[in-house]
Amino acid sequence: MDAEGTCALAGRNARACLAVDVEGLTKRFGARTVVDGISLAVKRGEIYGFLGPNGSGKTTSIRLMCGLLTPDSGRGTCLGFDIMTQSAEIRRRVGYMTQRFSFWEDLTLRENLDFTARVFGLPGRRAAVEEAIERLGLQGRAGQLAGSLSGGWKQRLALAACMLHKPELLLLDEPTAGVDPAARRDFWEELHALASQGVSVLVSTHYMDEAERCHKLAYIAYGKLLASGTAAGIAAGLGLSTLAVSGEGLQALYARLLRDGRVEQAVMFGACLHASARDARALEEAVAGALAPGQRAEPVQTGLEDCFIYLMQRSRDNFGARP
């Protein structure tokens, strides 16, 4: 039975359908509050993406939600287990893929997987290794040294290692950093296949196209949760209207718009300039009054990147901040 069917049977108990359910998670390292009162609910079989600048607390938040770190305050469950008191049970059911490739480069792909299965005392390890190799399409590379693999194949090896023990939840920390677009697409197709089978996924990413492939998103900046929900829901919640301007001389227009208080955000997007504000009429008047001959403005849907930049510009760095 898939995750949706399980949830339907759960009926009255909606929390039984949640892979992660946390409230008020806070974590400090010394004087710095790295995670500040974060609350989230992630459904089983859901791909939940985390966006935010480097050092914003994305990785720490994910580890707290899954019992890999102990919060200073807050509460929650992961896969039905208490994150404060049952972290060992959670770890047995989680697959964790770090950003950095951490396998032995002088072992083959198959040897790496077999060694990993041995370390974790996995029963029936040979069958588990062969199943992982087949599932991730690694048969043709199984005898190749890990050090000679491309970034995309190293990524597949890491995901295969995560899946050896058939986890219910995957934690992926910027898994496609430095990987070519084709390999990233294949990787995300595999994630959606896993999600359709009930595996939940928490993934941090800087790529907007990947963020749009998540079922839900959370924007985290400097330890605080700024927005969460679907991509469309986040955009609607911000209430931004956006105009895309094309033509020559956009850099000069960009400088003019930044000085206009009616324009809350101006960002260059390749050959276009995006201007955004919550007051659509004031935005149109400001842009129309600043256009040079040959420039044209038209309304466009506010995209995730527009939202991301808007949120980041209004967040405050917590470096050195005291609790």
Image: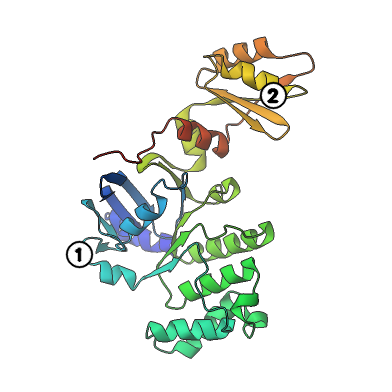
Residue 207 appears in the figure? yes
Residue 250 quadrant: top right
Left or right of 277 on screen, residue 287: right
Q: Residue 44, image x and y in percent?
A: 39, 59
Left or right of 2 on screen, residue 87: left
Q: Give the structural element (helix, strand or loop) at label 1.
A: loop
Seen in the picture, residue 172 relative to 37 is either above or below; the reply is below
Location of the N terminus (image quadrant) = bottom left
Q: Nearer the viewer, residue 7 or 103?
A: 103
Residue 273 quadrant: top right
- Residue depicted at 64% across the width and 82% down the height: 144
Amino acid on which disc 1 is placed: Thr
Left or right of 22 on screen, residue 133: right
- Residue depicted at 38% across the width and 41% down the height: 222
Sequence-earlier tag: 1 or 2: 1
Mark 2 highlights which residue?
Answer: 251
Q: Residue 72, image x and y in percent?
A: 22, 52
Residue 294 quadrant: top right
Q: Residue 268, image x and y in percent?
A: 65, 31
Amino acid on which disc 2 is placed: Gln
The crowd level at tag 2 (other Cα within 10 Å; few <14, some 14-19, many 20+) is few
- Residue depicted at 34% across the width and 48% down the height: 40
Label 1 or label 2, whichever lies nearer to me, is 2
Q: Residue 6, image x and y in percent?
A: 37, 63
Instruction: Indicate the colouring scheme.
Output: rainbow
Mark 1 highlights which residue?
Answer: 85
Seen in the picture, residue 179 relative to 315 is either above or below; the reply is below
Q: Nearer the viewer, residue 126 or 41?
A: 126
The crowd level at tag 1 (other Cα within 10 Å; few <14, some 14-19, many 20+) is few
Location of the C terminus (image quadrant) = top left
Q: Nearer the viewer, residue 131 or 51?
A: 51
Residue 137 appears in the figure? no
